[in-house]
Amino acid sequence: TIGAHSKIIYVEDYVMTFMKQLSDKDHTSCRVAILLGHYVKTDEGKNIFIKGAVEMKDTDFSNEIAFSDEGWTSIYENIKNYFTDVEIVGWSLIGPEFFLEGGEKVRKIHIDYFAGTDKTLLKMDSMEKDEAFYLYENNQLVKQPGYYIYYEKNEEMQNYMVENKEVVSEEKSYNDKTTRKIRSIVQE
């Protein structure tokens, strides 16, 4: 929708790399990450820039999806330790498709913890490797037509990823020539 309410979502490349690492770890279970960044107002609307993500630990998926106080405490500690000048701009739910389809549960979490029309949800299917962003419009989560990847020297996200790497994962090295070339240009 073009007009006064259009929003464009920009995601820094390391954030998507981190999300893909989370989805590769265990295809059968769900994981949650909190998305960090900032908003930029333009004449067309408010754009969302996502420059960080922190995994939410201690999330209960048994009946309802519930975020524990301990989970939030660790999120805020990680934000304080690794990031500056960011706010929570949304969340990500990563898991097998049948879990992501739990529409009412997911909508309730979004309303309870990420109220407002500016917070986004990134759903990432760990089996199919599909992902899509959603925004809350007219009392429902509406799938967005897409998002843009941007590149910057994102040391905050790099540091978080390095220090929170799970040793067990045999990581598939992300070896994309174009990405490496863009990174080297950005870092110069």
Image: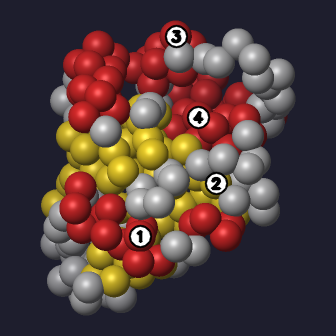
Decide which of tag 3 and tag 4 comes sooner along the chain.
4
Report which residue position mark 4 lands on. Answer: 18
Decide which of tag 1 and tag 3 comes sooner along the chain.
1
From the viewer's perspective, is the residue at label 4 or at label 2 nearer? 2
Identify the residue at image location x=45%, y=45%: 60
Q: Quick one: SS at disc 3?
A: helix
Which residue type does callout 2 highlight? Gly
Q: Position of residue 39 (x, y in %)?
A: 22, 52
User: Mark 1 and mark 2: span between their CA atoms?
Assistant: 14 Å
Which residue type does callout 3 highlight? Glu
Identify the residue at image location x=29%, y=13%: 81
Report which residue position mark 1 lands on. Answer: 105
Q: Are marks 1 and 2 in contact (CB under 8 Å)?
A: no
Q: Position of residue 13 (x, y in %)?
A: 56, 40
Report which residue position mark 3 lands on. Answer: 163
Q: Is residue 175 left or right of residue 74?
A: right
Kindly tell me whether residue 13 is visible in this rendering: no
Which residue type does callout 1 highlight? Lys
Decide which of tag 1 and tag 2 comes sooner along the chain.
2
Decide which of tag 4 and tag 2 comes sooner along the chain.
4
Identify the residue at image location x=73%, y=40%: 26
